[in-house]
Amino acid sequence: MRYVDRTSVAAPDSLTSSSGIGIREHGRLKNYHDDTVPGPLDQHGVAQPKKKPSFRAYKEDDVRHALEDLFHGKCAYCETRYDLTAPVDVEHFRPKGAVEGEEHSGYWWLAATWWNLLPSCIDCNRRREQETPDCLPSLLALLNDERATRLSTMKSGKGACFPIEGVRVEQLPEGDMLGPHAAEEAMLIDPCAEDPRAHLRFMIDRRNPLGIVFPFSDVADEDGIALPLLSEDVEAVKAAAHAAGASVKGAVSIQMFGLNRLALVQERTRILRRLEILGHSVRDLSVTADRLSSLSVHGEAQHVIDDAVLKLRSTVSRLLSDVRAMAAPKSPFSELARAWIQAFTQDLAQEAVELPDEQATTAANDEEGPAAQATG
């Protein structure tokens, strides 16, 4: 998950235009939920029960296209490219029709509100059973093809869940819309409202790549960081995160969105292994170029060495461009790649390996929005 500046894409006309479907739908929903507005009259002048309007505005093509532009065709939560495999779920961050586990009619007043809409893959949005690791040894064994190993399963996917710490907004607020909703203190990360790096971190072990995401904490030792509690009980997940000194919002978001479901971990691990191949090539070629350039020879041999060094450094530059591209906002799992680049450049610095034009370091430090002020 990465921070995305929602203001970089204009709100769709269908949601904001006075004649658009969004404004009209909001009016119908407001009348439906207003007890002072009677239902339609029958032929005898008797008011009939009101029929609940359907939610359709968020399905408009310009909404989908705007979200695709905003998130580059990726899921807002896990950064997979949904546009290559399945249609997008236009997800309501605050659920529109109900709130799971509560007597709540849903945030119907936000059903066609631009800042409440996010693009999601099916697995992050729809609640269903997913294989999910509850400890690192079980996952390592499975990834190493020990078929006897099985992961635990738990129901994940956001669905109509929306856990909060504050006071829930029960009805359409009068006047200010943002303030009352912010006061709810949502326990899920909205990547357009805050920097996910304040709550999430990736496990970057260059000797044993594993695409696991953790709730962020100040614990520096990897052995001191545990996976979020494998539970559908939000209160239990919160308590375990508190006890571990980890981000509660990070832990709840990981379990609610299923950010460590097996398929995601496998794909992120594949990305890390590819980065390791590129990284080792960059390191070895750079060291070889440095050693060759330090040689002092005469005549034609010097021209041969100079040409070889030039070609080696050119190859390193191309490899670094590939690495940098994997951390670009348009790339899937770009935050994972950024975290790996940060670890990679630190390792090279310890070995005193110099890179051409500091390309990898630049990629590691590329930021957008409030992410520039966060770590992780």
Image (cartoon, rainbow, N blue to C red):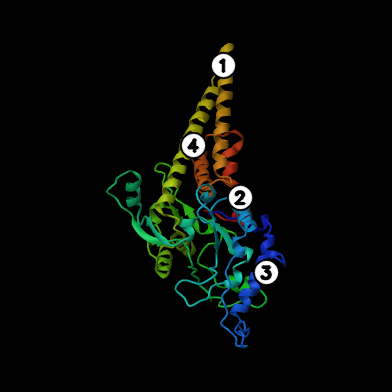
Q: Which residue is mark 1?
A: 304
Q: Earlier in the sequence, mark 3 or mark 2?
A: 3
Residue 372 spot, x, y in % from top left: 61, 53
Asked where in the image residue 109 lies, by quadrant, the reply is bottom right
Asked where in the image residue 311 lies, by quadrant, the reply is top right
Q: Is residue 113 above or below residue 42?
A: above
> Could you classify mark 4 by the number of other residues whose Cα lies within 10 Å: few (under 14), some (14-19), or many (20 or more)?
many
Q: Nearer the viewer, mark 2 or mark 1?
A: 2
Instruction: Identify residue type, mark 4.
Output: Gly
Q: Earlier in the sequence, mark 4 or mark 2?
A: 4
Q: Is residue 94 above or below residue 298?
A: below
Distance from the alpha carbon under mark 1 to that under mark 4: 26 Å
Residue 306 spot, x, y in % from top left: 58, 20
Instruction: Identify residue type, mark 2.
Output: Glu
Farthest residue, direction top = 299
Q: Which residue is mark 3?
A: 23
